[in-house]
Structures are given as structure tokens and as C-alpha cells.
Image (cartoon, helix red, strand yellow):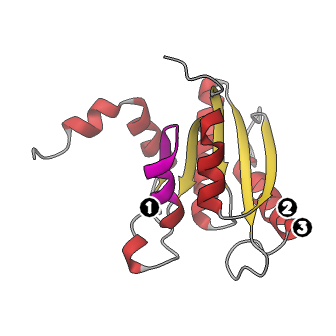
Amino acid sequence: MAVAGRDSRVIMVGVDGSPGSLRAMRWAVEEAQLRGSAIEAITVWRPGSTYGAGSAPEAEQIQARVVSEATAGIDPEPLISAEIEMGDAAEVLVARSAHAGVIVVGSHGVRSVRHAALGSTSEYCSRMAACPVVVVPQSANVESVAADVERPERRVRDQPPL
């Protein structure tokens, strides 16, 4: 069933300059090629931030670097639009999730031990987004993450019984 306003072909990626966001962008690029999807790279900045971007120009530089690294050697490159927004990354991604087919974020656990497995942004998006969320883990091989998304029954079947 289609959701009004949602474009299931759009892969929205949270880009903050971390190794996790680079992994997320690489996963999104491969997925976009497979599905013929467009990518929307979202970089959120906060004034005076000590992590990520502290200004719009800094956010643009971070985003350009991550997109460039993720698409190096890719032919043809998928269509990638770039958006810069001021605010809280998790809140911005969730607010935009109603118009995306999927959100892709990396996990990096920079906030606290409690969020070490996912990271607070990925945890919040996983709980609150209006669309599916792919969290690309630190140790992920992009191909293995894509395989699990393609065959979700494998993930369920391979889990121990409750």
C-alpha cells in the first residue's frame, strides 16, 4: 500500500562526516543503483557544535566530501540531491521521513554507552520514522547489509527462538 506523499524510490541518507555516515552513503549508492532510486543526502548543523557541522558552510563541505568518497569509481552515479538544514539531526530526519522510501544512517555511538550499539540519531529514527530505517553498523560489509534487506526472512529465520 502506498503512503500519500511518500516516494518509495527516494533513499534519504543522514550525512554528518563520520565514518558511519560514509558507510551509510556507500550502502545507499549501491542500493540506488540496484533499484534505480534517487538519493537525498541530508546534513544537519547546529551553531557551535563540537561534533559534526557547526555552520552551514561547514555542513556543505562535509556533505560534499562524503558524497564524493561514496561515489568514487561508481558508474553511473545515482541522482543525488543535497540538503542542508539547521537543527537536531534525528528530528530533521524523522520530520522528512514521511516523504522518503527509506532512511539510511550509520551507527557510531558517539553520545554515550547507552547508545553505543546504534547511536542516538539512529535509535531515534528507528523508533520514530514514518518509513523503514536501515542502520549500517560499524563493522558492516555493505554487501552483507544489502543482502539482509533483500531477504528479511533470513534475518528472522536465523534468530534464536524467544
Q: Tag 2, which secondary structure? A: helix
Marks 3 and 1 in Cβ contact (< 8 Å):
no
Q: State which quadrant residue 90 falls in.
A: bottom right
Magenta stretch containing residue 144, yes or no? no
* Relative to 155, residue 1 above or below: above
Q: What residue is drawn where x is 75% and y is 49%?
A: 72
Q: Tag 3, which secondary structure? A: helix
Q: What residue is drawn where x is 67% and y is 28%?
A: 37
Q: What residue is drawn where x is 48% and y is 49%?
A: 128
Q: What residue is drawn where x is 49% and y is 66%?
A: 120
User: How many C-alpha atoms fall within 10 Å of the one at disc 2: few (<14), some, or many (≥20)?
Assistant: some
Q: Write the start and end of the magenta stretch as one range.
A: 122-135
Q: Which of 142/28 is in front?
A: 28
Q: Which residue is mark 2?
A: 60
Q: Mark 3 belongs to which amino acid?
A: Pro
Marks 2 and 3 in Cβ contact (< 8 Å):
yes
Q: Which residue is mark 1?
A: 139
Q: Mark 2 belongs to which amino acid?
A: Glu
Marks 2 and 1 in Cβ contact (< 8 Å):
no
The span from disc 3 to disc 1 (Cα, nearest Å) is 30 Å
Label 3 vs 1, first from the N-terminus? 3
The span from disc 2 to disc 1 (Cα, nearest Å) is 27 Å
User: How many C-alpha atoms fall within 10 Å of the one at disc 1: few (<14), some, or many (≥20)?
Assistant: few
Residue 51, given in percent of the width and then of the height, sits at 67, 78
Q: State which quadrant residue 9 falls in.
A: top right
Residue 142, given in percent of the width and then of the height, sits at 51, 47
Q: Which residue is mark 3?
A: 57
Q: Tag 1, which secondary structure? A: loop
Q: Mark 1 belongs to which amino acid?
A: Ser
Magenta stretch containing residue 130, yes or no? yes
Label 2 vs 1, first from the N-terminus? 2
Residue 113, given in percent of the width and then of the height, sits at 39, 79
